[in-house]
Amino acid sequence: MAALPVPLPSAKMAAVEKRRLAIVPAASFTDSGRPSVSRAAATAESEEDFLQQVGVTKMLRAALLKVLEARPEEPISFLAHYFENMGLSTPANGGAGEPPGQLLLQQQRLGRALWHLRLAHHSQRTAFNNNVSVAYECLSVSGRKKKPGLDGRTYSELLKRICQEGEAPEEVVAPLLRKIQCRDHEAVPLDVFRAGMLTCFVLLEFVARAGALYQLLEDPTLSVADRRIGQAVLDTLEGALQASSGAAAPAHYLEAGSRLGPDSLAMAMDHALVAQRPSSPMTREEFLEKAAALFIAKVKPVG
């Protein structure tokens, strides 16, 4: 008489079932016999496609490139400001006579454009030009009745914002603005926009260096400089700028001023002091205004 099979304990049956499931391949097979993609792999692929479709991948890559260009001391804070400014994506065409909401949006657009322009120093030519192009796109008007582009009113407003935040006296920058501004409804191409932005930033740096130079000339007890010495320094600066008359870029004028060595300045000051003529004081404001006038005289007007 055959022996009846002895049933396995429940624990052993669970272990057998676990081993059976472990040898089943992760990928299932279709009717054609070819394995299908696992659910996890398909999910990962769909997530990657989604990020690319909505532009997140491209946006993150652009953000990282900006970090590499600017190399900020606090990258996290830099990225936070970057994404905050990226949030303003509605076309701007605000101005006089526009609804209040549109005016607010225009101011936000100007702030965003200015933020991009300040990401890289103008001496970093490639990065600066890239940021200028981004700023231009931020301010470009587009819509059903308007072609993409920048009007003179928005361009001139941005020039004023740059100068106001550059801590240069209004009397110093006003002559430059009159020279490079455009009419309100005039179309401003990218090359004119780039030249205007570069000229403003270079002038602000030129004025800052002139201010540092004036500190070396002024009497610390009177906070003014001797006019003979101040004028001698200005004449020397003018000579350096005249020597660079063949250069067309504003940055070359800044480089010309930077080449003023201590020997040439000392010689000019000695010659000024040799003359025993009575002298009057020269204030910082007057010195900066005259120094800026030398620079602005070299700038070509728009149009």
Image (cartoon, rainbow, N blue to C red):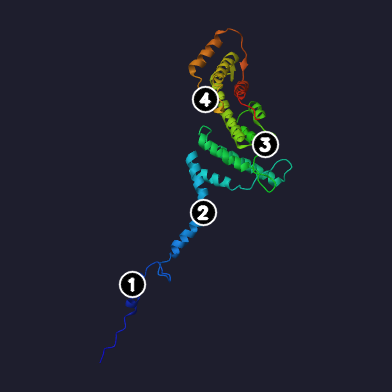
Q: Quadrant of the C terminus?
A: top right
Write down the residue under mark 3. 152
Front of the two marks 4 and 3: 3
- Tell me how far mark 2 sits from mark 3, CA to CA: 36 Å
Disc with the residue nearer the chain's start (4 vs 3): 3
Amino acid type for the residue under numbered disc 3: Gly
Furthest residue to the bottom?
Answer: 1
Q: Is residue 72 visible?
A: no
- The local secondary structure at tag 3 comes to helix
Residue sitting farthest toward the right? 97
Marks 4 and 1 sit apart, C-alpha to C-alpha, by 78 Å
At a point 71% along the width and 45% down the height, the residue shown is 100
Residue on which the image places disc 4: 255
Task: Locate residue 194 relative to residue 178 in the image: left or right.
Answer: left
The mark that comes first in sequence, 1 or 3, is 1
Query: Mark 2 sits on what residue?
Result: 52
Q: Nearer the viewer, residue 162 or 251?
A: 251
Q: Measured along the vertical axis of the image, is residue 64 above or below residue 278?
A: below
Q: Are marks 2 and 1 in contact (CB under 8 Å)?
A: no
In this figure, which residue is indicated by the disc labeled 1? 19
Q: Nearer the viewer, mark 1 or mark 3?
A: 3
Q: CA distance from mark 2 to mark 1?
A: 41 Å
Give the residue type that dot 1 points to.
Answer: Arg
Residue visible at 64% across and 34% down?
160
Q: Nearer the viewer, residue 282 or 294?
A: 294
* SS at circle 1: helix
